[in-house]
Image: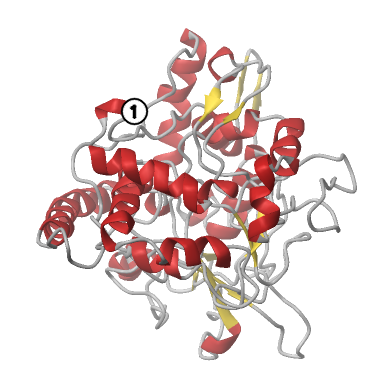
Amino acid sequence: MHTYTKTFAIVSIVFLAIAFALSSRSQNAGPSGPPVDPGVRAGAPGAGEPIGGLTAGELDFFNRIAQPTFTEVDAVANGLGPRFNLDSCAGCHAFPTTGGSSPITNPQVAEAAAIAPGNQVPSFLALNGPVREARFVNNGDGTPDGGVHSLFTISGRPDKPSGCAIAQPDFSNTANIIFRIPTPLFGAGLIESITDATIRQNLASDPAGQKSQRGIKGHLNVGVIAGTVNTNPNDGGVTRFGWKAQNKSLTVFAGEAYNVEQGVTNEVFPNEREDDPNCAQNATPESDSTFDIGATGPSDVAAFRGFMRFLAPPAPACTGSACSPSIQNGHSLASQTGCFNCHTETLMTGASSTAALSQQPVPLFSDLAVHHMGTGLADGVTQGTAGPDEFRSAPLWGLGQRIFFLHDGRTNDLLQAIQAHQSSGSEANSVISSFGSLTSSQQQDILNFLRSL
């Protein structure tokens, strides 16, 4: 069976069991008991389809080229390695369906023997834990690192080049390792289509002084002064993708991930990360556009970009008056406590060459800026101008069908994820204090609202 198909089948079966269990635990909590995360929302995935309004040509590209390319499994001949984290984009972005985040069953563990024979599964991975990439905070000499160190090598694979014998990184010093989990890709084209001006204006706005009263000063990961609208040193553009908003566009995002996560060189990142000549024997870039007379084909990165660009946003379980009183009250309370000071409910796209993305509301629940999240969440890594404790406000849409939370997937409990926002130096301290002062019933309403997204 195809590696991705087999993994998805496992995910689908386990999802039903775990979703039922998680839902049951919330129903067992009495109305006067402590608040409980309702758990992963059961039912069909509210995402994974192409966005409505695509032209016939755009829809054909999505269905015939983009989605199949995103789900394909790479071998060494296709460019896998020499170092890699997994052999398929869809293996990491798998839940609740293709394009999502980390699945219930971690393919880095479940498929390790097949995709990386002879490699050891690092101790920080678990079969029922999140897909993870590992970054070293510092180099051996104490200077800052922050880069991804791929988990596996092709050295034990039967399709490796003769003589390839590179070793895995040394992951024994776990105090020097931080983790990142996959970000969901649903609605990514809408996020890309939000204008820089809209993001800046939203960040600068402070109705009734709510942000300043709560100590919220987030900044864009493009400059040097917190609390102001900053610009990229090269083009003045606003970066918006990634846990620290380190990437500007879906093309850069796709090219970097292809090279870092699977080791495949491409038009955007054309050089091997591991240049041992015994292992890196493919001509580069390994994924390139094909140039045939009368038939020029897109590269994988172009296909990935198209897949993400044309993915519909995740659908909530309900909206407005169709929601239960608890969910409606939770929405109001989330606003009152200040959650939306960072997790802006809706931003608008600008004029787009793709009509389906043009002048559209984007209910992403994020300001796409980075904020100080305090010592409790700090990872010690700087990317661009996002410092060691700064992270992008994670979009909350689709939260109802997400398993793992926070940048490193440290918890699958939404309540714990909320509480983790409070620590020394966090801009969310006032908001979390307000949340903590609510009654258990009110906190439950907020949890129910968030799981409805």
**Crowd around label 1: few <14 · some 14–19 · many ≥20 (10 Å):** few
Lateral position of residue 235 relative to residue 296, left or right: right
Q: Residue at x 80, y 58 (%)?
A: 226
In the rendered image, the residue lying farthest to the right is 233
Q: Residue at x 46, y 30 (%)?
A: 311
Lateral position of residue 408 relative to residue 263, left or right: left
Question: Where does residue 434 sit, x and y in percent of width and height?
Answer: 48, 62
Taking 321 as reference, is 233 above or below it?
Answer: below
Taking 370 as reference, is 175 above or below it?
Answer: below
Question: Where does residue 5 sit, x and y in percent of width and height?
Answer: 26, 46
Instruction: Write down the quadrant of residue 418 in the picture.
Output: bottom left
User: Which residue carries the number 1 mark?
Assistant: 320
Q: Residue at x 51, y 38 (%)?
A: 364
Instruction: Write down the quadrant of residue 165 in the picture.
Output: bottom right
Question: Where does residue 286 sit, x and y in percent of width and height?
Answer: 62, 47
Lateral position of residue 271 relative to residue 82, left or right: right
Q: Residue at x 40, y 83 (%)?
A: 123
Viewer-closest of 453 and 170: 453
Mark 1: amino acid: Gly
Q: Secondary structure at mark 1?
A: helix
Viewer-closest of 111 and 191: 191
Q: Is residue 72 visible?
A: no
Question: Where does residue 33 sit, x and y in percent of width and height?
Answer: 18, 66
